[in-house]
Amino acid sequence: QVQLVESGGGLVQAGGSLRLSCVASGIIFRMYGMAWYRQAPGKQREWVARISSGGTINYADSVKGRFTISRDNARDTMSLQMNSLKPEDTAVYYCNAWGRGYYWGQGTQVTVSS
């Protein structure tokens, strides 16, 4: 059974930092591309960042220069370092794995206060 478990969310003031992690099980992690998405209240889920199985990285314009995605294939873990957080970054953040299958985590709440 595939599981993606996010952690690291919380409440932070604007300008602060958080680091999200996603631990995968049930998949051959190194063969999957990984991504972060987020969904704010009343809005559609949007893509934030992705890292391919080969290490190619892309960011949404809204987070470019502030967020850093990384992966550790030895630990089946993906991370998202979020700096200079803004109130508009408030959302539930979801881990996504794509490859032979397509999987989602349960999400972790990030709240940025002004």
Image (spheres, grey):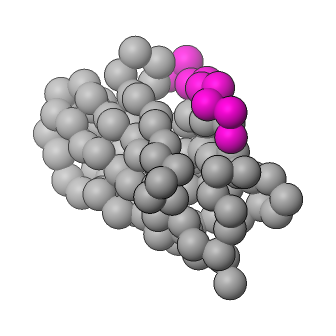
Q: Describe residue 100's horizontal placement relative to residue 33 as left or right.
A: right
87 or 60: nearer the eye? 60
Image quarter (top left, top right, bottom left or bottom right) of the N terminus:
bottom right
Q: Which residues are magenta?
A: 53-62
Q: For residue 8, which quarter of the picture?
A: bottom left
110 or 43: nearer the eye? 110
Question: Is residue 26 positioned above or below 42 on the image?
Answer: below
Q: Could you tell me if residue 54 is visible in this image?
A: yes
Q: Picture coordinates of residue 50 (x, y %)?
A: 61, 36
Q: Give the residue furthest to the front.
A: 74
Q: Could you tell me if residue 114 is visible in this image?
A: no
Image quarter (top left, top right, bottom left or bottom right) of the C terminus:
top left
| Residue drawn at 55 percent across, 18 percent down | 61
| Residue drawn at 47 percent across, 64 percent down | 23
| Residue drawn at 68 percent across, 33 percent down | 54
Q: Picture coordinates of residue 51 (x, y %)?
A: 61, 35
Q: Describe residue 5's horizontal placement relative to residue 44 as left or right.
A: left
Q: Describe residue 49's horizontal placement relative to residue 15 as left or right.
A: right
Q: Picture coordinates of residue 45 (x, y %)?
A: 63, 49
Task: Please identify the dominant SS of the magenta region.
Answer: loop
Question: Is residue 1 positioned above or below 14 on the image?
Answer: below
